[in-house]
Image (tube, helix red, strand yellow):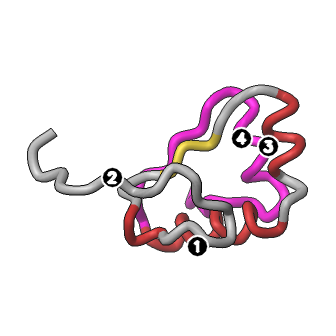
Amino acid sequence: MAGITTSPPTNATFESAQLDLYDALVLPGGVQNSDTIRLIPGAQNLIKSHDATGKPLAVICHGGWLLVPRAWPKTSG
């Protein structure tokens, strides 16, 4: 892709991920993935912080469960 000059680290934890390095956030699908990740406070904080940036948030299958605990993203209508 044009304009890409660097790749963000792929071994970052939820707590250490630097959102300014990422253009989007993808929430994985799968019952076990979502159920495990939604219980990690750092994951919920990362999702909330990412949502506040206005950058794209992609959700695969059961990944939507990660949005339920705090009702993100907020929508109108």
Q: Quadrant of residue 73?
A: bottom right
Return the residue at label 2: 7
User: Residue flagged by tag 2: what amino acid is it?
Assistant: Ser
Front position among marks 2 and 4: 2
Return the residue at label 1: 49
The image's mark for residue 3 is: none
Q: Quadrant of residue 36?
A: top right
Q: Where does residue 46 sit, x and y in percent of width and height?
A: 64, 67
Q: Are marks 1 and 3 in contact (CB under 8 Å)?
A: no
Cα distance in 3D space between marks 1 and 4: 16 Å
Cα distance in 3D space between marks 1 and 3: 17 Å
Q: Where does residue 30 sit, x and y in percent of width and height?
A: 77, 26
User: Residue flagged by tag 3: what amino acid is it?
Assistant: Trp
Query: Considering depth in this image, is 55 or 39 the residue closer to the camera?
Result: 39
Return the residue at label 3: 65
Q: Which class describes the residues within 10 Å of circle 3: few (<14), some (14-19), or many (20+)?
A: some
Mark 1 vs 3, N-terminal side: 1
Q: Quarter holding the C terminus?
A: bottom right
Return the residue at label 4: 64
Q: Which class describes the residues within 10 Å of circle 2: few (<14), some (14-19), or many (20+)?
A: few
Q: Which class describes the residues within 10 Å of circle 4: few (<14), some (14-19), or many (20+)?
A: some
Front position among marks 2 and 1: 2
Query: Which residue is at 83% across, 68% downward?
Result: 41
Query: Which residue is at 17% across, 55% downward?
Result: 5
Q: Is residue 45 above or below residue 68?
A: below
Mark 2 vs 4, N-terminal side: 2
Cα distance in 3D space between marks 2 and 4: 26 Å
What span is in magenta?
54-77
